[in-house]
Amino acid sequence: MSDEMVIRHGSPTLAGLKTGNLFSCTYTGKTQLQKALRSLNRRLSSKGVRIVPLRVTEKTALLYLYRPGKLKEDFAVREAAEILEEYGYAADAPDKCIVRLSRRLKGSDRFPHEIGLFLGYPPEDVKGFIENRAEGYKCSGCWKVYGNEQEAKCRFERFRRCTSIYCSQWSRGKSIECLTVAAGS
């Protein structure tokens, strides 16, 4: 897993615009994967960013790049906490929620749709997706929108622009550390 891959798939999180991003990567050995994750966490943790594997198979890893402080804020929202609690999460313990999410991903062929809350999606959209079984949405981009369509479209565009700018800056030699915005900035 390269820094470029993290930038390509996680720029909005690195920029502080989004709580988290989820992406898959292939790897050649678990030791190599663990070493790459440790290196990234060492370099990004001071900026308030972490990366953890949620599910690891023989050749691929599903990685979660996130901002722990932002995740805690998101889970403190009543609507988000209610959804999480409905699926057996303790919203006041985000680290434990990540462990539970990882177990749910490993223990089922079905994707746990509450994962949207871990990515910073609006609770009303996560709830709408679950209740409507992914049907009847107003629009879609990074997620399917059931609530504020205009606000979601603005966020989608902001994420797209951020990714474009970050990839361009990376190609010009900026490091992932320079591109990552410190928490609270």
Image: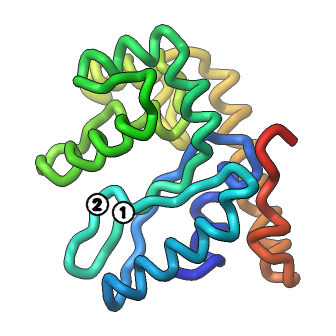
Element class at badge 2: strand
Is 182 located above or below residue 37 in the figure?
Answer: above
Image x and y of residue 60, in percent: 31, 75
Is 138 located above or below residue 24 in the figure?
Answer: above
Image x and y of residue 86, in percent: 25, 16
Is residue 7 left or right of 106 when viewed as pictured? right
Mark 1 nearby-residue class (10 Å; few <14, some 14–19, many ≥20):
some
Residue at figure coordinates x 52%, y 31% from the top left: 121
Where, by quadrant of the figure, is residue 134 drawn?
Answer: top left
Tag 1 residue = 62
Q: Nearer the viewer, residue 95 or 73?
A: 95
Residue at figure coordinates x 75%, y 71% from the top left: 176
> What amino acid does circle 2 point to?
Arg
Residue at figure coordinates x 30%, y 17% from the top left: 85
Distance between the Cα atoms at labels 2 and 1?
A: 5 Å
Is 36 located above or below residue 16 in the figure?
Answer: below
Residue at figure coordinates x 24%, y 23% from the top left: 87
Element class at badge 1: strand
Mark identifier at residue 178: none
Is residue 5 left or right of 150 when viewed as pictured? left
Image x and y of residue 125, in percent: 46, 22
> What amino acid does circle 1 point to?
Leu
Total marks in image = 2
Marks 2 and 1 close (CB-CB < 8 Å): yes
Q: Earlier in the sequence, mark 2 or mark 1?
A: 2
Is residue 48 left or right of 179 when viewed as pictured? left
Tag 2 residue = 55
Where, by quadrant of the figure, is residue 28 drawn?
Answer: bottom left
Where, by quadrant of the figure, is residue 99 drawn?
Answer: top left
Image x and y of residue 40, in percent: 60, 71
Give the residue furthest to the left. Answer: 108
Mark 2 nearby-residue class (10 Å; few <14, some 14–19, many ≥20):
some
